[in-house]
Amino acid sequence: MRLKALTILLPLLAVWLCGFKFIQPPRKWNEADMPIEYYVGEDSPAGMTEDEAREILVDSHANWANVDCSPLRFERAGTIPNEPTFGRSDRTQVTFQGNLESGVLAAAVTHASSNVLEQNGNTFFQTTAYNIIFNSGPAWGTPEYIGSPDCFGRYSYLSTSTHEIGHGLGLGHSCDDGEPCPDPIKRNATMYWSGQRCEDDRDDPNEDDAAGINSIYGVAVDFDVVSPETSGTVGTAPMTVVVSVPDEFQIDRFLAFEWNFGDGSDLVMLDADDPALDGLEHTYTEEGQYTITLTAFGDDESCGGEFETFKRQVGAVLACSPPQPSAEFVNEGDFTVQMVNTSPLGAFGCTTEYEWILDGDESTSLSTYEPQYVFESAGTHTITLRAAGPGGENTADFEITVTRNSDVGCNASVTGRGSLGLGGLLALLGLAGLVRRRS
Amino acid sequence: MIRSTFLSICFVLAASVPALATTMQPLELSELTYVADLVAEADVVANSVEKVEGKEYLRTATTLRLTHVIKGSAADGDVLDVLALGGELGGEVTTVHSTPVFTPDERVLVFLEQRAGAWHVVGLSQGKITLVQEPGTGRDILVKVAPPRGLQRFDEEAVQLPLVPEYFEDILSLIVADLHADFVPTYRIIAGLPAHKDAAFRAAAKLEGKFDARWEDQ
């Protein structure tokens, strides 16, 4: 059971803890295969001329070649009949007017052999080709059209083609449909899961995309973070963590490192030979979800001289204060009381659990967000709302009076409000009764 | 440790590894409802992975038993197969990002469309929502989960529920209201929508005054 929970929850959590993602299983091109030759279907995407489309395809490939330290090179090899297919493992190609599911703008299949490549501590299958298909239906626009106030109904061809090529190079989505995506850098990444009409924000790879492509092909850096108190990165504020740069990333080409702890504190710059790279303490004093960024500065011919690369761990540290439970109640009549959870949720997910306890009887506890109690008769009861999270737990007690009449309209009879440790409910009617759960 | 174990498993399994990923067009609930040929609650019965003849990638046929048909000509209790690219078979892996992955015993709300005589999920993962019963109330909560391919059985108790739940009954009432009102969303081009459906959508939107004439130029 525990293992199943882990395997189901992991995909949801992974995006929260990491920045960019790889396509799974990971795959990359061999640098010996540069330049990557690609073919283009002899059709054009709706809304554009063939020349415009081809020029933008050159630009979208260049978007990845131009990332600092990227060894990627591309060459347009020629024109092919426009026959949309994902089945060409021997040829990289872009085709149009596909027959993909509704709601799909474009898709890329990345073919890989069983050869294995290593880069920056990761293992990849060797990519042999990618096949990109633009779906039928939508019209596309040049950057000039998409960025103009007259833009209507079209999608950015540069953004979408750069996105699909990113898949062909091994990148997954920065955030997927249904996943939490609170980090604006990931939401604005070219590799975000979806695109909107007349939107050009994602035409060029941003820092998350660049860090992703560099971790596959270029110079990457990474770090560890842990709280000595919890052995994790979640705990009670104030919370101290230790950050460190693993040995494999303390390499000659890096000259200095800079820590940004994401809480407004001063940046910390360390030389490459500073022993604090093996362990640097930082204390978060206030509740929050903090993103830590490590930037490495270096000098390398393959990167064109001086360069910098970085790693962000989004929401890496969660420091929480104890939750503050509060509630209101609505008497719905017929001895039915609806709980209304008014506890502040906060912005950081520091409340993870609610529990409602009737008359101190733990065996009746309900973990629903807003349960409804149906009593058999009128009466006065104590409801305890317990809220818990990484910062601890708190309880609030409320006294409610159950009535036959609803408090809707003229028969107002029961509402209640409480706060920490206080019973605060107004009572109008009363006859003791038993409770049963709503089915 | 977990990461390296996962990678090891992947690299042992994979002899051929095509992977598909997409750029999606986000669809509103009213668009999913309007576009779908079939909207239903369903139980996932089984998955069957097959290599598409003449192709280098795998696809999965998921057998669904419809428990409550909300839109469409099927009946409660009907069984149908939904096709999607991706799967694992005999050491081969086809990874497809954004494609819905179904697990036996999972309960789902699905928006399906027919393409070339086969059922597909509208908007890939957008058209599949998992239902999980809320402990204590028995009410179904809507969740988006990404179970790993090959999971033998879906365990609702293993799903971490959102702190503030969205209830199935609420979304159901919205869908039913749309259907009873013959609601037509404001027109826009939906990528991949078959031509006859797009034409019907345009016509209906024009009748309802929900068609911007600039779409004629697209």
Image (spheres, rainbow, N blue to C red):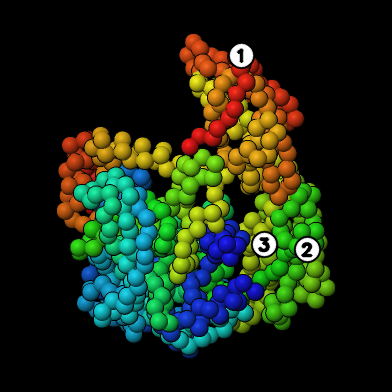
Instruction: Tell me if A352 is positioned left or right of B33 in this view.
Output: right
Which residue is at 53% across, 61% downward?
A: A8
In this view, the residue in front, A86 or B137, is B137
Q: Secondary structure at mark 3?
A: strand
Q: Amino acid at mark 3?
A: Thr
Residue position for label 1: A428
Tell me the quarter of the picture where residue A300 sits.
bottom right
Please tell me which of labels 1 and 2 falls first in the chain.
Answer: 2
Indicate the position of residue A117 as horizontal and vertical percent values: 53, 85
Report, in whole angstroms, how far the alpha carbon at label 3 lies from the one at label 2: 14 Å
Tags 3 and 2 in contact by the CB under 8 Å rule?
Answer: no
Indicate the position of residue B158 as horizontal and vertical percent values: 55, 57
Mark in the foreground, 3 or 2? 2
Report, in whole angstroms, how far the alpha carbon at label 3 lies from the one at label 1: 57 Å
Q: Is residue A276 above or below residue B168?
A: below
Tell me the quarter of the picture where residue B182 sits.
top left
Tell me the quarter of the picture where residue A161 sits.
bottom left
Residue position for label 2: A242
- Label 1: few (<14), some (14–19) or many (≥20) C-alpha neighbours in 10 Å: some
Q: Secondary structure at mark 1?
A: loop
Q: Amino acid at mark 1?
A: Leu
Chain letter for mark 2? A
In this view, the residue in front, A410 or A433, is A433
Residue A230 in view in this figure: yes
Q: Secondary structure at mark 2?
A: strand
Disc number for residue A293:
3
Report, in whole angstroms, how far the alpha carbon at label 1 lies from the one at label 2: 56 Å
- Label 3: few (<14), some (14–19) or many (≥20) C-alpha neighbours in 10 Å: many
Indicate the position of residue B211 as horizontal and vertical percent values: 23, 41
In this view, the residue in front, A233 or B177, is B177
Mark in the foreground, 3 or 1? 1
